[in-house]
Image (cartoon, grey):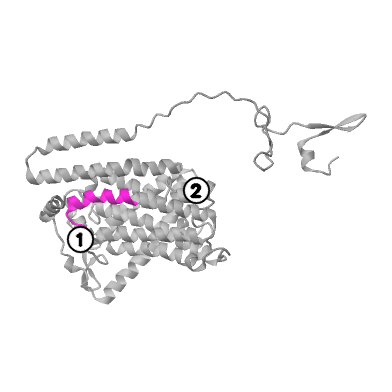
């Protein structure tokens, strides 16, 4: 198996291969300035995404949305941030104070660190110094992103556990199970990208998509990743850790003020992070869309690629908002079954298919057209079988025997249900013998007011 993998990886030798030696050669002030710019861009992007989501959802629901603070309401997110900072900071008495304070920091720091290996553009003149529009890169940059993103789960779990609240603990457990489950499918979806690009470096993967984006030739991987990234970020319709009807508010129920703002910031930065990863690995990264480079030769030079990169990222962010405004929340068992019974098996089958195609392409013993057709048929059959639900056995309703109801059988005074079922509307008036010569009628309103005569 190892020999097969090693024979697949050199397939990208003919593709553009940027030299990773250009990274790590920048002076300290360039590295510091890049880090500060990435931090500022992410903070401003978070403020914009909150405003953008509220405006788009309002438009979908025939409302206006924020339009008072600043032009088009753009300062509404800033006003909400200031309001959160000025709120009272409460720490529950039963909370583990140290862990309770560290949990938001553990959640938000990995969200920023992941952007260190995201390429924004090619090599440019940066204040008189030639440097790539990327903080750094490494041969295993994609694995670095997945590893750093996994650390954020600890912040959510510890935040729920340290709150000393049952609802927060359940929300943290839900979130950890959900994020771990969908990280498996997400990681498997990226294996096909590694096989085609021959590298795990983000800059080399972008260069490998010079002719054709991986989102087209690896469409099943792209679809699986898009579904997984929605589940990974706990966004609707997969926002089960924050199900208000079941868990009040989720893992951050007991948080307030700036600590709650850090969790909020981590969620929206992760939203942009998974969108940037999808753009880099499947949509050509900072490369201009098709046709633009043929019309305009300078489309992929200078700082223009930053525009193409964020344009693709905003398309994914709009997809997040669209899903939130359109789909209802799934049941937890359905959500976990989708991850373990559908996405992961399809990912494994697709990886085997991609590896087989790449090996046969090297050896050239079998016609590739027939091979692709056969694998496509198998994938269609696999997906079709996934949608065939299990037949539920319909049991005939058993005869209900009327037995005397003991209201105190379980130790609690539970009144019996009325004979005709639940009463709808106002309760029927009750009549009591008040005196030997007459009767008194008591209505529901009179029961609520004991002084009524």
Can you identify the residue that label 2 sits on?
243
Locate residue 215, reporting x and y percent.
Answer: 24, 47
- Asked whether residue 48 is in view, the answer is no
Mark found first going from the N terminus, 2 or 1: 2
- Point out the stretch of residues depicted in magenta: 183-200
- The picture places residue 109, in percent across and down from the top left corner, at 38, 65
Q: Is residue 303 rendered to the left or right of residue 257?
A: left
Please give left or right for residue 155 compared with residue 82 in the image. left
User: Where in the figure is residue 65, as x and y percent of width and height?
Assistant: 49, 50
Q: How many marks?
A: 2
Q: Position of residue 82 (x, y in %)?
A: 51, 65
Q: Is residue 96 visible?
A: yes
Task: Please state which of residues 376 and 202 is positioned toward the viewer in this rendering.
Answer: 376
The quadrant of the picture occupied by the C terminus is: top right
Q: Which residue is mark 1?
A: 301
Q: Residues within 10 Å of mark 1 (few under 14, many from 20)?
A: some
From this view, report whether residue 44 is shown above or below residue 352. Answer: below
- Identify the mark at residue 54; answer none if there is no mark: none
- The quadrant in which residue 415 appears is top right
Alpha carbon distance from label 2 to label 1: 46 Å
Compared with 410, 20 (above or below) is below
Looking at the rendered structure, the secondary structure element under dot 2 is loop
Residue at 68% in and 35% down? 406
Q: Considering the whole magenta stretch, tell me its main secondary structure.
A: helix
What kind of element bears circle 1? loop
Q: Is residue 8 magenta?
A: no
Look at 12% across and 54% down and name the residue there: 10
Is residue 189 part of the magenta span, yes or no?
yes
């Amino acid at each position: 198996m190892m020999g097969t993998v090693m024979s697949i990886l050199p397939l990208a030798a003919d593709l553009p291969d940027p030299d990773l030696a250009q990274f790590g050669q920048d002076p300290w002030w360039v590295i510091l300035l890049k880090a500060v710019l990435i931090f500022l861009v992410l903070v401003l992007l978070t403020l914009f995404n909150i405003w953008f989501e509220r405006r788009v959802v309002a438009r979908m629901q025939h409302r206006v949305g924020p339009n008072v603070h600043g032009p088009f309401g753009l300062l509404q997110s800033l006003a909400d941030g200031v309001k959160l900072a000025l709120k009272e900071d409460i720490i529950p008495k039963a909370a583990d104070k140290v862990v309770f304070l560290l949990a938001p920091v553990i959640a938000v720091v990995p969200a920023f660190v992941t952007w260190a290996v995201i390429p924004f553009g090619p090599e440019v003149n940066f204040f008189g110094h030639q440097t790539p529009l990327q903080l750094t890169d490494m041969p295993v940059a994609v694995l670095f992103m997945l590893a750093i993103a996994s650390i954020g789960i600890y912040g959510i779990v510890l935040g729920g556990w340290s709150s000393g609240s049952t609802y927060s603990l359940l929300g943290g457990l839900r979130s950890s199970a959900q994020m771990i489950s969908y990280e498996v499918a997400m990681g498997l979806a990226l294996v096909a990208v590694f096989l085609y690009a021959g590298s795990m470096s983000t800059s080399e993967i972008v260069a490998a998509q010079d002719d054709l984006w991986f989102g087209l030739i690896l469409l099943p991987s792209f679809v699986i990743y898009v579904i997984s990234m929605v589940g990974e970020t706990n966004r609707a319709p997969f926002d089960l850790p924050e199900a208000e009807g079941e868990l009040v508010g989720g893992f951050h129920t007991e948080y307030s003020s700036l600590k709650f703002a850090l969790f909020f910031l981590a969620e929206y930065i992760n939203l942009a992070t998974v969108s940037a990863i999808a753009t880099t690995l499947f949509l050509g990264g900072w490369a201009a869309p098709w046709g633009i480079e043929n019309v305009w030769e300078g489309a992929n030079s200078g700082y223009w690629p930053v525009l193409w990169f964020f344009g693709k990222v905003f398309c994914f962010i709009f997809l997040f908002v669209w899903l939130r405004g359109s789909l209802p929340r799934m049941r937890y068992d359905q959500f976990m079954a989708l991850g373990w019974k559908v996405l992961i098996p399809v990912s494994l089958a697709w990886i085997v298919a991609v590896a087989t195609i790449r090996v046969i392409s090297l050896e050239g013993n079998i016609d590739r057209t027939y091979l692709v057709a056969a694998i496509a048929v198998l994938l269609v059959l696999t997906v079709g079988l996934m949608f065939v639900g299990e037949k539920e056995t319909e049991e005939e309703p058993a005869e209900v025997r009327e037995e005397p109801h003991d209201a105190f059988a379980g130790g609690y005074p539970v009144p019996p249900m009325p004979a005709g079922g639940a009463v709808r509307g106002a309760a029927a008036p009750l009549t009591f013998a008040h005196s030997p010569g007459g009767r008194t009628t008591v209505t529901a309103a009179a029961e609520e007011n004991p002084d009524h005569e």
